[in-house]
Structures are given as C-alpha cells and as structure tokens.
Image (cartoon, rainbow, N blue to C red):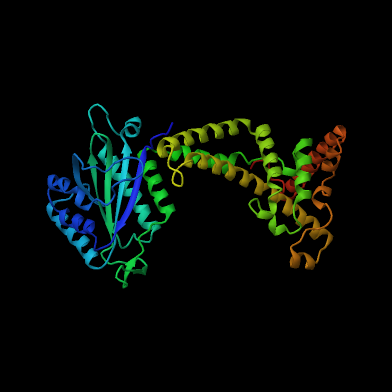
Amino acid sequence: MSKTPGIVTVMKFVSPGDKKFSGYVNYMDRPEAMRSEHFKDWNANRFDGYNHYMENPEKSDGLFTAAKDSLTQEERTELKGQFAMAQNNGSLMWQTVVSFDNRFLADHGLYDLRTKQLDQEKLQQSIRNGMSGLLINEGLSNTAIWSASIHLNTDNIHVHIAFVEPEPTRHMFSLSDPDGGSHEEARGMLKPATISAFKSSIANELVNRDQSLARLSSLIRNELPQHDYDWSKLPDFDLLQLYKDIYKALPDDKRMWKYNMNALHEVRPMLDAFSSKYMQRYHPGELQEFDQALKSETDFREVLYGSGQDGKEAGRAKDYEHNKYKELYARMGNSILKEMREADDAVYRKEHPNGSSYHKAQGRHPTQGIMGAVSSIKRALAGDVQAHRQAQREYDRMQEEKEADHQRQQGPGYERGW
C-alpha cells in the first residue's frame, strides 16, 4: 500500500512577465480575506503528483519573513515594493509549497486534530531554517528576499513561500521565442540537492533528530571501528586468514588502496566480510545499537517521504539505510587498508633505505612483507594453536620491555598513568 508522505515540497519559478508574478505582487499588501480570494491569481503550483494540496485556502494567517512573524501594513507595502523592483529588474520569482500531512504534525505534537491548534511558531522557524539553507546552497543568501504564509484548511496544512532577487544575479541564457526572436532569462532551476536539503532541514527542525543522528555518527566514526590490537594482530585464525587474503588480492599500485577505488571492486566483499565478522565478534552491543538506531531513523524517513514517486522520492528511506551501512564499511575498510599500506611501506623502507625506486613508482614491494613482519601471524595462519599462544606471550613480553625502557628514559619520577 502506498504511504502518504508527512511533508511534500513543490517548487516552481515564473518569469517576470508571467501574470502569476504580477498577481502575487498586486495582492501582497491586501487584507488576508482579499489575498485568499485571489489566491489563484498568483499560485503557480497547481498539482504536485500527490494531491491538490494548494486549493483556495480557507484561512491564511498572514505573511511572515526571515525576520518577522507578522508584518504591519507599512512593512507589507515595503515588501511589495521590493518584489515589484525585482520584477522590473528581470528577476524570476520562485514559488514553493510545503505541505504537511496533518496526522504527521499531530504525531509529533505540533497539531491537535481535535482543537485544530497548530504550533505556528515552530512551523515558521522550520521554514526559516529551510530557506536559509536553500539560499546559501544556491548562492542567493545576500541577494534574495522571501515571504511566506501558513494556510490552514481541512485536509493539509501548508505554507506558501515566494522569493525574488531585487537585484538579479542568476546566470542568464538565451531562449528562443515563438516568433523566431529570442530573449534573455535567468536560470530558474534549483539543484536537486538543494531541494532535498530544504525538506530535510524543515523536518529536522520540526522533529529534532539531532541526538539520534549524532549517535549514529559516533558509532560509525568512533566506536565500531575501535580495536585493541592492530588489525593484523587480532587473535582469530579466520580473521587473520582473511586479512592475508585481502592483502594478497590488493593491486600493486598502493595509491589504489582505498575502499571506494574501482581497482578494489573484487576486494571490497572481502573487506566487508572482515568488518562484519569483527563487529559481530568484538562489538556486538554497539552493532545492535547501530542497527536499532538506523531502523528508527529509516522508519522516520519512510513516514517523512512516504512511498514517493518513481524518479523522485521512491526508496529514499532505504537509500539512507544503504548509504549508512556503506559509510560504516568504508570507514572500517579504509582503516584496514591504511594499516596494510603503512606496514608494507615500513618493510620496504627497511629493505631499501634509499627508497628511490619506491618514491618514483609508489608500487608494492613484491615480497609478502606485511605478513612476514610478524612471526606470530605466520604461525597462527599455519594453524598451530600452541605456537599462536606462545607468539602472543612473546608479543606481550615485548610490549612490557618497551614500557620498561620508556620508564627508564623518563627517569625516577615516572609512574604509569601519570
């Protein structure tokens, strides 16, 4: 069953000669009743593929702007003059409709379905945040002005927004006229990423997801990739064997040793398998928390975007889930590859002190230096359990000796943990 999205955004632009532009300007400073009556004269968004969200509104609560919750008559007249100037100077007018499913607003404590009370202050602030980002992303933050009004009707609460440039700065290009002539017009299309970010900004302001998103980010960046050993020294035969297989499969050119490089197409599944086994074995609690937090965020985005339309927002929630897993595996994969690259470099520099040919080619040393550098790994991969345990004890002894040498260098006042 198709799901209705919690928020729908529709954007269109009209040229300065369009009657929709003139209609908006003409009624900007009129009383609300008159503005509502002539709403059709300036509304460019007629149908958005989901519903007729922008029918003639039963009620509008007046214009608001980036700095004002409501405008006096004098302020409305001044704003009208700026829009008229923009039209005279050849600016486009961008019209945006942000429509909300009333149930979505009610579920998040922003609207009372029984009393019809709406948290308009929160709604206005969300639009301000969204518009601030939109104008920055389009390079219009210092040149554009906008006004908006909240429309209340029985089906869907929606906000109508219009913005212009009193002194146009958008790139101009030539368009052909039906009579064979041509005219210059500003670029009207907004970047898809701008529109997506606009909607996300509004949603994040209305339903604060900062804590949930921050936790996901922390798990990806700081907690799941953490390990007490070097990747090559994990005391697990299967992980060590997989580590060796990954290393053997890497291309000779170490500049390609990055997770998302095309040259690692065949290696990535092995890196992912290593990361998956590692997380399940060493961080099961964090992995479970990650899965639960990601499911919660995905569920929210399914409510936010609904089923969507093919080519537009269909599958957006699942795309988010996929991308977060991809981000996690990429970060862990790059950590493994970085260690391999550094270990391989160390072995090569030891065997070739001048390093001349290495620095020219950035190639890979032909020997299996990374696996030959640690004898304990060799013995572990051979399947000799006793040898592996002995190697671990030897490693611990070396670490203790290293610590003791460090203490002696620090002098008699040094203590562990100082």
Residue at horizontal 76 percent and vertical 49 percent from the top? 247
User: Could you tell me which quadrant the C terminus lies in?
Assistant: top right
Q: Position of residue 270 (x, y in %)?
A: 71, 43
Quarter where residue 241 is shown: top right
Q: How many marks?
A: 0
Q: Position of residue 187 (x, y in %)?
A: 36, 63
Quarter where residue 398 is shown: top right
**Is residue 278 at least partly visible in the picture?**
yes
Q: Residue furthest top?
A: 114
Above or below, comparing residue 315 to residue 23 in the picture: above
Residue at horizontal 68 percent and vertical 50 percent from the top? 265
Q: Residue furthest front?
A: 179
**Is residue 230 at least partly visible in the picture?**
no
Above or below, comparing residue 310 to residue 79 in the picture: above
Q: Nearer the viewer, residue 45 or 65?
A: 45
Residue at horizontal 77 percent and vertical 47 percent from the top? 405
Q: Is residue 386 left or right of residue 182?
A: right
Q: Nearer the viewer, residue 255 or 215?
A: 255
Above or below, comparing residue 368 to residue 377 in the picture: below
User: Could you tell me which quadrant the N terminus lies in?
Assistant: top left
Above or below, comparing residue 143 to residue 310 in the picture: below
Q: Nearer the viewer, residue 32 or 334?
A: 32
Residue at horizontal 86 percent and vertical 40 percent from the top? 379
Quarter where residue 98 is shown: top left
Q: Is residue 162 left or right of residue 335?
A: left
Q: Is residue 403 left or right of residue 326?
A: right
Q: Position of residue 59 (x, y in %)?
A: 18, 40
Q: Position of residue 64 (x, y in %)?
A: 22, 49
Q: Is residue 294 left or right of residue 260?
A: left
